[in-house]
Image (cartoon, grey):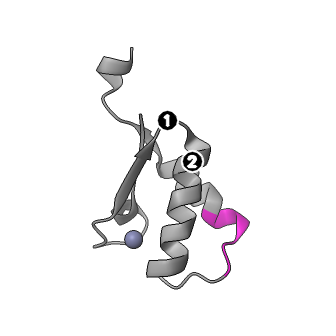
Amino acid sequence: MRLFECGTLVPGCQWHTRADEDAEVVRRAVEHLRTVHGEEIIRENMVENIKARIRDENGAAAA
Ligand SMILES: [Zn+2]
């Protein structure tokens, strides 16, 4: 599973999401940023920022 924690991008936010694919994690994260943090316009660098912070969850189990 791939994991994104919003707190890595927005300090103090406890929201996180996980999915099998990066694309799904990004989709959910963008939706979260839009609805919760009021990011009406998701710029390309925002997507890059999200992607850069996605990490493997339970890397040992996935190996
Ligand atoms: Zn958040």
Name the side, left or right, on which 8 lies relative to 49. Answer: left
> Looking at the picture, does residue 44 appear above or below residue 21?
below
* Residue at mark 1: 20
| Contact? badges 2 and 1 (CB < 8 Å) | yes
Amino acid of disc 1: Asp
Q: Residues within 10 Å of mark 1 (few under 14, many from 20)?
A: few
Residue 47 lies in quadrant = bottom right
Left or right for 13, reference 22? left
Q: Residue most toward the top? A: 63
Q: Secondary structure at mark 1?
A: loop
Image-quadrant location for residue 44: bottom right
Residue 21: name its quadrant. top right
Return the x and y of residue 3 as percentages of the image width and height: 40, 44
Magenta residues (range): 41-46
Locate the C terminus and report the quarter of the image it occupies: top left
The number of numbered badges drawn on the structure is 2
Q: Which residue is mark 2?
A: 24
Horizontal and vertical percent position of residue 56: 41, 34
Q: Position of residue 50 (x, y in %)?
A: 54, 57
What distance separates the C-alpha of mark 2 from that of mark 1? 7 Å
In the rendered image, the vertical position of residue 14 relative to residue 54, given as above or below:
below
Under mark 2, the amino acid is: Glu
Above or below 28: residue 58:
above
Callout 2 secondary element: helix
